[in-house]
Amino acid sequence: DTGVSQDPRHKITKRGQNVTFRCDPISEHNRLYWYRQTLGQGPEFLTYFQNEAQLEKSRLLSDRFSAERPKGSFSTLEIQRTEQGDSAMYLCASSRDRGIMNTEAFFGQGTRLTVV
Amino acid sequence: GENVEQHPSTLSVQEGDSAVIKCTYSDSASNYFPWYKQELGKRPQLIIDIRSNVGEKKDQRIAVTLNKTAKHFSLHITETQPEDSAVYFCAASKSISNTGKLIFGQGTTLQVKP
């Protein structure tokens, strides 16, 4: 499968613990996004990378959240001191940069986080 | 702020009937409007998209229309089949922001009864 892959698929953690998720985008895509999806809602934008540069962060992304894309390839999303409200599906997406023209974003299967 | 409203939240149709899902957007700078289908437990997948320089686009049984003046766009599925049952999301983005981030609607759960 040469699509966007995310690891792990499921994560159950105790409140207060730190968790880290990984996303491997499609190899030639230089744009990478993280979204959060809760039950019955559409995905909500969290953050955006162009290559290794994090160019936009949503106000939804509290200080406990940090994302990196160190070499412009895979990305990690870390949540520190998890809270029950962090329980959600975390989706990664990637797309090709075509200048001012937006292109199709391909999504991974997501990491489902449950904080108990 | 940027917002996309989607209606209805649930839609039940008989196999063979048409289904229409409507979305409105708030940011007049939005110029790219994709539609994603998400089956239970699976990733969202693009089914059709439209740019603001086009009023309508068709792909077999699926069509999307865009009214820039009214800031709304719609998904039309004709001759529905049970395998069309899924959650559908509309989204909007603007190239001027140069990020391509998508603002999604709340989703429509479509059920096609055989």
Image (tube, coloured by chain):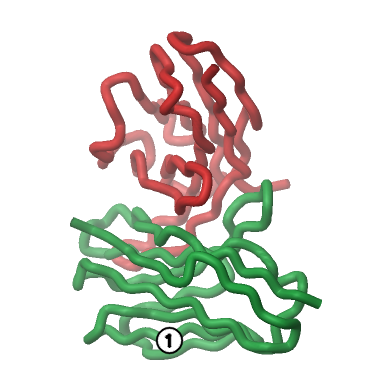
Looking at the rendered structure, the secondary structure element under dot 1 is strand
Amino acid type, mark 1: Thr
Q: How many marks?
A: 1
Left or right of residue B27, residue A42 in this image:
right
| Residue A115: image location, x then y, percent | 52, 20
Rendering colour (chain A) = red
Q: Residues within 10 Å of mark 1 (few under 14, many from 20)?
A: some
In the displayed image of the protein, which residue is found farthest to the right? Answer: B114
Closer to the camera in the image, B99 or A91: A91
| Residue A95: image location, x then y, percent | 47, 54
Q: Residue at x 43, y 47 (%)?
A: A30
Quadrant for the C terminus of chain A in the image: top right
Residue B60 in view here? no
Q: Residue at x 22, y 86 (%)?
A: B69
| Residue A33: image location, x then y, percent | 42, 44
| Residue B41: image location, x then y, percent | 68, 47
Closer to the camera in the image, B44 or B77: B77
The residue under label 1 is B65
Left or right of residue A53, residue B60 in this image:
right
Q: What is the chain identity of the residue bearing mark 1?
A: B
Looking at the image, residue A108 lies above or below residue A85: below
Image quadrant of residue A22? top right
Q: Residue at x 44, y 90 (%)?
A: B56
Q: Residue at x 21, y 67 (%)?
A: B27
Image quadrant of residue A49? top left
Rendering colour (chain B) = green
Looking at the image, residue A86 lies above or below residue B15: above
Residue B45 in view here? yes
